[in-house]
Amino acid sequence: DHLSTEREMGLALDAVTGYATDWDPSADGPVRALLLADSTLYVGGDFTRIGGQARNSLAEVNLETGLAVAWNPNVEIGGYPASVRALARVGDVVYLGGVFVAVGSQPRRNVAAVDARTGQPTPWDPSATNCNCNRYDGAPYVSEVVPGDSTMYVAGHFSIIGGQDRGGLAEVDLATGVPTAWDPQPGPRVPDYSLYITSLALADRTLYVGGSFWSIGGQERYWIAEVDRRTAAATPWNPRAGGAYAVPEALAISGDVLYAAGRFVTLGRWQRRQGLAALDATTGEPTEWDPNPNGVITYGVAVADGKVYVGGSFSRIGDQERWGLAALDPITGGALDWTADTNESVFTVEAAGGRLFAGGYFTTINGVPRNYVASFDLASGELTSWDPRPDRYVFGIAVAETTVYLGGSFWSVGGTPRKYVAAVDVATGALRDWNPDPQWYVHTVALKGNTVFVGGGFKSIGGLPRKCLAALDAATGAVKDWVADAVNVNPNLSRIYDLELMGGTLYVGGTLDSIGGLPRGGLAALDAETGRVLDWNPAFGSPTSDYPVEAGVVWSLASYGATLYAGGRFRTAGSLPVATLAAFPRVLGPGDDPGPTPTKLSVASIAPNPVHSSAVIRFTLPSAGAVNLGVFDVQGRRIASLLKRELRPAGVHDVPVRTAGWPQGFYFCRLEAGGAKAVRKMVVLN
């Protein structure tokens, strides 16, 4: 009630009450950096207007009025909003980093210095770029500028700065803009990819570094490290950050304590898994299986005939040289003898009908020409003659009895025009007449009966408006009346990355904030027959992001039994802390069989158990009624009341519990309903 007035991308809060003050610069885009120096407030971001004035991405704002002053460096990126992400001031010079190509009409690439009095760019010009040898490596940017003594530490996503080779991190002379010899060499330096360094914190003699590295300063370090400011060598300090895409996004130092925030999920005691792991389906704990690929990422996994097939950007996996595609032993994780070396990344693998289908960026397999998609005989391991020949990349594959459906960025298949989605003969690879003609890329394809579901970044398909998701007739390619538009707060970032069918329910994952007009964060469940959005809402929350995506992002979905697994970039599901990988019980669609009604009251499961910070308690209720569910310690003291005389229907129910801060030890979950009781033991390990 106290914060009733709207603020656009910036506000001031009273330091005592927390209420919003009248100070309101009203930026028209995201604010990414603030710098308060000598009673002067500098604001950087993606805006084009702030404090009542036109200002491209950088402004000085009056601390009393919130209005922009005359100072105007004018940061540009060729007709599009630029992005200032980092600010620092040394003397009368303001240093900035971000995504831009010019400052004050002078060429400046992603890092620059401007006069604090006039706003004009100084001659200092390190120019941070990447090698531009792989369009999918992303645009270069600078995420941090941190002053040293007579130098500036510059971090971000680049491979060239000041004309010299540096992997996302450099020390640059404040006078000349030339990089010094200091170079901790974050790694691995994979060809065609430059590194991402996301955060820095400066100490007296060392620099703390967070980013997407696995080695730095000549030592093995994962995601976070301390390096000597004189020698660039890594110190013995090693918290061993781990987890899926475990990149610290922010660092701050206070005395002897370094605070780190980001995407890691373990610190200290951990089990290292480099882009590929096997997890216990019940507890979520990693097994001993560890193929240890050396590449940037593993994109696709399929299991068939007792083998695990994986595709990605690696050149070594399972202790053997394998390029992009490999078959692994399901017990040991070692690479099997099968060799199918690709010259570029494999993005998707699918096993069906005695064959393995692979799609991606490759144009040869074992030296044999295969443009972006291929198939192998699972019995012999041999590459088949099947060769549809799309002219560009394949991201998704779905296999029916006689037809293979392809989704990607291609414009033709077998020499015939066909944009982004196609159907080819499963035996010959010949293109079928089926032609839905989406407006943009298709990332994922799924099949159910006579319906092909496609998800991607398109805004129309078959001449009809459909945002990112559509249902197509499997025989004719006609767009069905089924409509469930998926939307992100930034329409240009709306994407569906994966689809998973479980019975009559279609799970949809991507960068969505809403679907079918209802709010959903990253993941939603739909009635596969009608497109109606089901009530289920995991409400994924996002980590700090380089992109304006408010909800969490779901990149991959898989199901096993009655459980759905979701992977992506998220930190919370509802009120629970869940980082990058989550599991959910199956959602029943309108046509799904709910199975037999439970015959007795029980606490069916607690997963995971032991519990480290949170878990889900599943209980069965034989008849509708009021339910009490609580957690007690071994002395019988109530620790938590999860349900207190709440009415629940008969069936299976899940209730989350958070154990952060509880003492380690044994606890008991006690369920009461209809005069009956059920108890199950729970172990908490913090």
Image (cartoon, grey):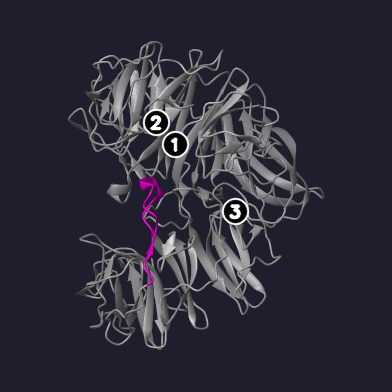
Name which residue type carries label 2: Thr
Distance CA(mark 3)–CA(mark 2):
29 Å
Magenta highlight on residue 128: yes
Say the numbered circle drawn on residue 363. 2
Q: Dot 3 lies on which element?
A: loop
Circle 2 Cα neighbour tier, 10 Å, few/some/many (<14 / 14–19 / ≥20): many
Name above or below for residue 7 compared with residue 422: below
Magenta stretch prevailing secondary structure: loop
Q: Name the residue furthest right.
A: 635
Residues at circles 3 and 1 in contact by the CB criterion of under 8 Å: no
In the picture shown, does residue 653 fall above or below 370? below
Give the CA separation, mark 3 to mark 1: 22 Å
- Front residue of this view, candidates 92 and 194: 194
Q: Residue furthest left?
A: 463
Residue 30 against residue 315 in the figure, above or below: below
Q: Which residue is mark 3?
A: 214
**588 above or below 223?**
above
Q: Nearer the viewer, residue 105 or 261?
A: 105
Sequence-wise first label, 3 or 2: 3
Question: What residue is drawn where x is 81% and y is 48%?
Answer: 634
Q: Residue flagged by tag 3: what amino acid is it?
A: Trp
Which residue is at 70% across, 50% downward?
A: 270
- Residue in front for this viewpoint, 14 or 30: 30
Relative to 45, 612 lies left or right: right
Q: Which residue is mark 1?
A: 344
- Circles 1 and 2 in contact, beta carbons < 8 Å: yes
Image-based side of 208 in relation to 543, left or right: right
Identify the magenta region.
126-140
Left-right relation of 215 to 366: right
